[in-house]
Amino acid sequence: IEWEECGDHFEDIRYHVSHEGIARITINRPDVHNAFRPQTVAEMIQALDSARHDSRVGVIILTGAGGKAFCSGGDQRIRGDYGGYRDDQGVHHLNVLDFQRDLRTCPKPVVAMVAGYAIGGGHVLHLMCDLTIAADNAVFGQTGPKVGSFDGGFGAAYLARIVGQKKAREIWFLCRQYDAHQALDMGLINHVVAHEALERETVRWCREMLQHSPMALRCLKAALNADCDGQAGLQALAGNATMLYYMTEEGQEGRNAFNERRRPDFSRYPRNP
Ligand code: 2NE
């Protein structure tokens, strides 16, 4: 497949479109396992909007650069004390929640192409995509209770719709990691392939969708979304709860522990009745 680079003004992502109608958004911060900062998210929002409005594009791939990670969530080095991730002006953002909504409301199918880690807020991004194709080195999981964070919106409610309540509770409460075959068995992803074949296979799935009626795909995505659209309201409220949690000492202990490469110590915080 031949990709044309379409976003030379982007710093944190790359944006390509193929002549056959596939757009590809690549998070390009491999040094931090493709953790996102507010600028990364702003660029992904812009690229997704371009793909949505580009009449040549029928399907969109979201992926991560480097082969070791899809995305490792919010960049903990710039997680501030005032409810979000700091930009260069010192403003705190949780704009990944906007991007989650954009993935969901985009009328074109979005496919997560996952090699390596899809962890924390990066795991939720693959979850928000319509389909997930994973390489055999993929690793899935949530980390929130370890690093002082949580996604009580789609990250919890939509996850439970996909894998069931028991499994969703296990994933969040224990913060374990799951390999590609375990993820496939729990219905979290659609397909596993050898790492070398990941892009070829993902493009094959995209080409199949490109054969089909865009209007039918659009209506089906809206229909499948509608079933759990109440979660969009929950997401807004839960995002505010995360914002408040990030302002607490307890939440900050998780972040500090990750940044200081030590185990978190939550023993000082009350286990309220
Ligand atoms: C992904 C994981 C498990 C990989 O572990 P490992 O041992 O293979 O790699 P390592 O050494 O941890 O990571 C490689 C480099 O990437 C950085 C690391 O600090 C390390 O840097 P250097 O030592 O080479 O300098 N890195 C990795 N993830 C990062 C991150 N998120 N922020 C900043 N730097 C990061 C392991 O790396 C891991 O557990 N990562 C953290 C995952 C995580 O907890 N993410 C945040 C969850 S909260 C969230 O995303 C969120 C939310 O819950 C709600 C709203 C918005 C965001």
Image (cartoon, rainbow, N blue to C red):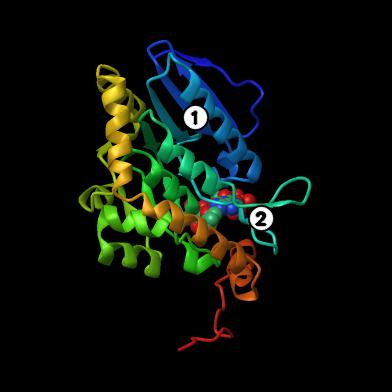
Q: Is residue 7 above or below residue 192?
A: above
Residue 160: give x, y in percent of width and height.
Answer: 30, 58
**How many residues crowd mark 2 within 10 Å: few (<14), some (14–19), many (20+)?**
some
What residue occupies the far top of the structure in this picture? 19
Under tag 1, what secondary structure?
strand
The residue type indicated by label 2 comes to Arg
Q: Is mark 2 within 8 Å of ligand 1?
A: yes
Place residue 219 in its image quadrant: top left
Q: Which quadrant is the N terminus positioned in?
A: top left
- Mark 1, Cα crowd under 10 Å, few <14 / some 14-19 / many 20+, is many
Give 133 or 159, whichever is nearer the viewer.
159
Which sits in the foreground, 91 or 177?
Answer: 91
Separation (CA) of disc 2 from disc 1? 24 Å
Q: Quadrant of residue 268?
A: bottom right
Percent across and percent down for residue 9 are 67, 23
Q: Residue at x 53, y 58 (%)?
A: 239
Secondary structure, mark 2, is helix
Q: Which mark is residue 25?
A: 1
Looking at the rendered structure, the kind of residue marked 1 is Ile
Q: Residue 14: horizontal and vertical position, in percent? A: 56, 27
| Disc number for residue 77 | 2
* Left or right relative to 139: residue 48: right
Task: Select label 2 or label 1 by which is in front.
Answer: 1
Please say whether residue 60 is visible from this viewpoint: yes
Looking at the image, which residue is at 38% across and 37% down? 112
Query: Considering only order in the chain, which callout, 1 or 2, is on the residue closer to the N terminus?
Result: 1
Circle number at residue 115 = none
